[in-house]
Image (tube, rainbow, N blue to C red):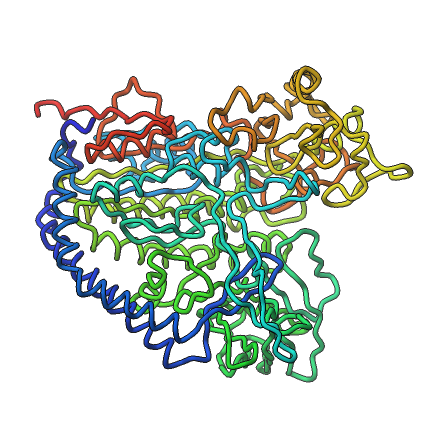
Amino acid sequence: MFRGCHKIGQQCGAAGARTSRRRKSRCVFAVRLALSTAACLLAGAIHARTAYAYIGPGAGFVFVGSFLVLLVTFVLVLFSLLTWPVRCVARAFRRRKAKRRHQDVGRVVILGLDGLKPELAERLMDEGELPNLARLREHGTFARLNTTYPSISPVAWSSFQTGANPGRHNIFDFLSRDASTYMPVLSSVEMGKVDRSLSLGPYSIPLGKPSIRPMRKSKPFWHILGEHGVSSCILRVPVTFPPEKYRGVMLSGMCVPDLIGTQGSFVAYTTRDDIRIEHEGGAVVRVERNGNVVNAELTGPEDFLKKRGGRLSVPLKVVIDGDGASAQLNVADQSLKLTKGRHSDWIRIRFSAGLGMSVSGVCKFLLVEANPHFTLYVTPINIDPDRPALPISHPFVYSSYLAKLLGTFSTLGLAEDTWALSEGVIDEAAFLEQCYTFHDERERMFFNALGRTGEDVCVCVFDTTDRIQHMFWRYLDKSHPANRGKDIEQHAGAITDLYRRMDGLVGRTLDRLGKRDVLIVMSDHGFQPFSRGVNVNSWLHQNGYLALKDGAEESGEWFSSVDWTRTKAYAMGLGGLYVNQKGREAQGIVPDGDEKRLLKEELIARLSGLKDTGGNRTGITQVWDSADLYAGPYRENAPDLIIGYGAGYRASWDSVTGKVGAPVFEDNKMCWGGDHCIDPRLVPGVLFSNRRIDPGENPNIMDIAPTVLAAFGIEKPGYMDGKPLEFERESGD
């Protein structure tokens, strides 16, 4: 597999001497982390007012902390400290045994640059803009990395970590559907409720905690590495929430909720009447200005402790300076100065629920305007990494360790607030500031981990590439519908600058690698413009496959006016189409067997090659039967058909949320002007490495997991569909 190392300049050689120091630093890190655990638990016992909380989307939270839990956990930590030397020796023996067959491999370091587009990277390399990636291309590998069907981030990253097709890992989209209600559910995690509670006056005290169950199946490669004595540091890889136990440390990524249980909900306090939230993702709170003072409430999670329910909140007061260029913010017994147009630092907000219990989150504030109108933007309230309300890392205190070492950081899975920009609450400059602030936080985590990782694995995914391309792709096409009446010059270089910054990250990573270290730089998919939306549900309605209730001419969100007793098929999510199957859906009418098969064949024939009514372009290039795409025990959970949209197209915003009756084709006027949820053949990802990959290979994102296993001499398990990539020996070795 890995037959010799190809050198990238002389800088890697200089780093090789640091390997032994990294081994020592790993031991120091283990001790520090254990001590940090003990310190955090002692602090929790001393400050008994704060208890752990568990959050469920739309279900609030429940407090479960107790002195007994703290005591038992402290005893376990003490036991861990006492047995640490023995475990270190045993782990070193297992690691040495695992690596015996591949002594030419040091560490494996994977940089995930979500959404990096190979064609754009290639052009910028040719123009001399990306010297570090160009060096990898010249002396190592640059290839297109085939992605999953569909080319959606949670699907692709699940295949990355498991080496398996979606039929084996059970993730087919951001959303799945509840067949009993036709309502959407998050595909990656299932949040349960507490079954029992104790009634105490106005309080209903939960006896236990709700379940948080990952829906991604199959085993990630770092679990298998751990079973062979190889530890891993996994930072912000999507679909790793809730974190699972394994040999190593992890900070969960995409799909971590905010403190109120959503995938990210901002708040805008404003005196304006013209700010409207047209889509999910935030709320507008109208406020009154009394002179230079604005008073409001910052609302947090649901109060699951009180029988009457409601939301917890803290008072918020803003005193505007005379010229409106700044203001004094008072919130949660804290006072800070806000400068117009700049985000504040992270502010910890503690929400008290009574009985001496509280839960804390962190957020940032942005004074958007102060004169004559007032608008204050508040980011989604993130789970506090120092005092997490639910597990976002493994071990549980790892996030607290990072927060104490590096400072507070974003924990929300989709941290960059694309909705606030789309809804016009913040502008492009504020969005970029936010993105790069979060990116810098992650860089500090990554390089801290890299400095403490010896001959093991370090993986970190950076989302900035995906978010900025989504929101700034329209600048690459002046005719994009989203540009009408908007500036198209000020940030015209945003994406080029983004790629330059990522190239700098690659260069700083190379500076820290040794001779035998393997670097993989990869993306889960590429990018294309998103200029026109396709409402598949409207097409189904117009062509007799989806029926509305008598008297209805259109349907609101989530099929509110659909007559399921006369509906044969419906679309949900970004790439899926379901047959309304009898015995599977609550009101299914299409029998399984030949009738379903013929319906699928008919839909494939009619939708594949569907032309845009506003021109002669192809809106849908191909529709696939999922039975032909997937294999594995979870294939039956997939949509019946997978839709591949043409370049420039995607499922429309209305189609994704189950609206029916809008035009089939319509302009996309949102700032979200680039996308990848289309025909996967049009959006491959990138694969760079400091090793040469056999040019005869056709790499797929499923190949990364078995390739990492092969680097440590570990055979891939039978469920993995990917293949270990063959690396060439350097000429003359």
Tell me: 451 left or right of 169: left
Q: Position of residue 601 (x, y in %)?
A: 66, 16
Query: On the picture, is 53 further left or further right than 371?
Result: left
Position of the C terminus, as image quadrant, is top left
Q: How many marks?
A: 0
Front-most of residues 86 and 563: 86
- In the rendered structure, the answer to whether residue 593 lies left or right of residue 628 reads right
Q: Quadrant of residue 406?
A: bottom left
Residue 511, image x, y percentages: 20, 47
Residue located 53% across and 61% down the image: 55
Name the spot of residue 354 as percent of width and height, x first.
56, 80
Please tell me in which quadrant of the rendered image residue 623 appears: top right
Q: Quadrant of the N terminus?
A: top left
Residue 671 can be seen, yes or no: yes
Q: Is residue 427 visible?
A: no
Residue 6: image location, x then y, percent: 16, 31
Residue at the spot x=48%, y=39% of the render?
153
Viewer-closest of 294 and 219: 219
Q: Is residue 174 left or right of residue 691?
A: right
- Residue at screen point 70% across, 83% down: 290
Q: Nearer the viewer, residue 526 or 47?
A: 47
Question: Residue visible at 48% across and 71% down?
Answer: 360
